[in-house]
Image: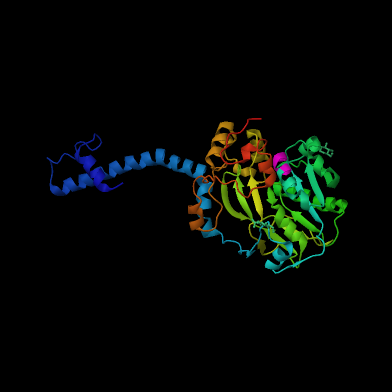
Amino acid sequence: MDSAGYYTNCKKTDGICEGICDGEHGSKAVLSMSRLKCALRGFDLKALLFLLIGLPIIIFVIYVHGQKVTYFLRPIWEKPPKPFTVLPHYYHENVSMANLCKLHGWKVREAPRRVFDTVLFSNELDILDIRWHELSPYVSEFVLLESNSTFTGLEKKLHFKENRQKFEFAESRLTYGMIGGRFVKGENPFVEESYQRVALDQLLKIAGITDDDLLIMSDVDEIPSGHTINLLRWCDFTPEILHLQLKNYLYSFQFMLDDKSWRASVHRYRAGKTRYAHYRQTDDLLADSGWHCSFCFRYINDFVFKMKAYSHVDRIRFSYFLNPKRIQHVICQGADLFDMLPEEYTFQDIIAKLGPIPSTYSAVHLPAYLLEKADQYRYLLPGNCMRESG
Ligand SMILES: *[C@@H]1O[C@H](CO)[C@@H](O)[C@H](O)[C@H]1NC(C)=O
Ligand SMILES: *[C@@H]1O[C@H](CO)[C@@H](O)[C@H](O)[C@H]1NC(C)=O
């Protein structure tokens, strides 16, 4: 782009400037005028080339990476949400419950509260199995609702109903509900999602929840650790609503993204007041309370299904995102399925998280049932990224 460049071109008489640049003829003034013209002509050509080739490339790059540009600039256009008040969490298997409650500033009860674990189920059978086994010793009633519609209005099988016999251990404590989808075309997926969550409130009443029972509100893949729920059911004076800080994993327990998952919450139930929700409801967050394993699926097809059924279906900007080979590659890399930048609120955090998630080789402090059934759930453990196509 520098004029020296055109000038040099000109001196070399590249055809366009031929004659004009020939310094043999004319005065110095004419010569410099000619050089200017020449430079301008050269410029015209380059500008034209730029318009014809460069501009479309730039537009294409913005089209492909536009989301990245806006995400990268997020710290400018969006303020971070108010930080949580993180409550320290104390636990060791050898410390008595009386002492654990005391360490948190709470008081041990004579008997534990009843616990209701309530989930909206899609198709994550393996994660449900691990979740329910982790929580089983502490849960009074498992409440599960499934629909024949995804949030995006696609028809879906009743995966739980079809596999119910695999959950024999929970059967005596299970309240199962099925809700027909509304299949409204072109609607915002969050509408169907909230419709299904409202149905969960009804199902909870059918399950027999009463005031002061503990209610876990979380997605299936947000798994509170058993000892966390045991602590909360045994102590008095805990906050009425408490969010749980979970470690965020992606694809398996090999890729730990951060410890910032907060959507799961535990409520002391109040009839007429408590509503099943998955957004922020209070400022209190109990540290290190379990695991959130996103996109932790056995089959490549499950990834494709989830990508389409997901409330953020607009993130599938190109159909090759759903290509099985690409998905397998992305899983092994710990990269992003939607090719997006990290959703963070400061440049420091965005930059710290650029690129694939580093692998962890620790399988310490994971759900016990995952390790007991390691043969069955090997794909969730570090070092096993290859998936079946299924
Ligand atoms: C746990 O407590 C038992 C008995 O009180 C004791 O024998 C054992 O050494 C303790 N284990 C740890 C890891 O502290
Ligand atoms: C979904 O379930 C409802 C309620 O059982 C039923 O009426 C409807 O036909 C089902 N729709 C599909 C597409 O399976």
In the picture shown, does residue 188 fall above or below 209?
above
Image: magenta residue range:
123-129
Q: Position of residue 232 (x, y in %)?
A: 74, 60
230 or 17: nearer the viewer = 230
Residue at x-position 13% and y-position 43%: 26
Task: Indicate the position of residue 252 as horizontal and vertical percent values.
Answer: 61, 42
Give how far across and how far down residue 213 sits, in percent: 82, 59
Image quadrant in which the C terminus is located? top right
Disc tally is 0
Secondary structure character of the magenta stretch overall = helix
> Percent x, y for residue 91?
66, 59
Query: In percent of the image, x 84 and y 47: which residue is there?
Result: 173
The image quadrant where one finds ligand 1 is: bottom right
Judge from the rendering whether residue 29 lies leftward or rightward of residue 281; answer left or right: left
Q: Is residue 228 left or right of residue 53?
A: right
In this view of the protein, which residue sits in the foreground, 141 or 70? 141
The answer to which of 196 and 289 lies nearer the viewer is: 289
192 or 389, nearer to the observer: 389
Decide if residue 31 is on the left or right side of residue 93: left
Residue 36 in view: yes
Q: Is residue 126 magenta?
A: yes
Q: Is residue 119 magenta?
A: no
Name the image quarter holding residue 95. bottom right
Name above or below for residue 189 compared with residue 389. Answer: below
Q: How is the image coloured?
A: rainbow
Q: Is residue 19 left or right of residue 217?
A: left
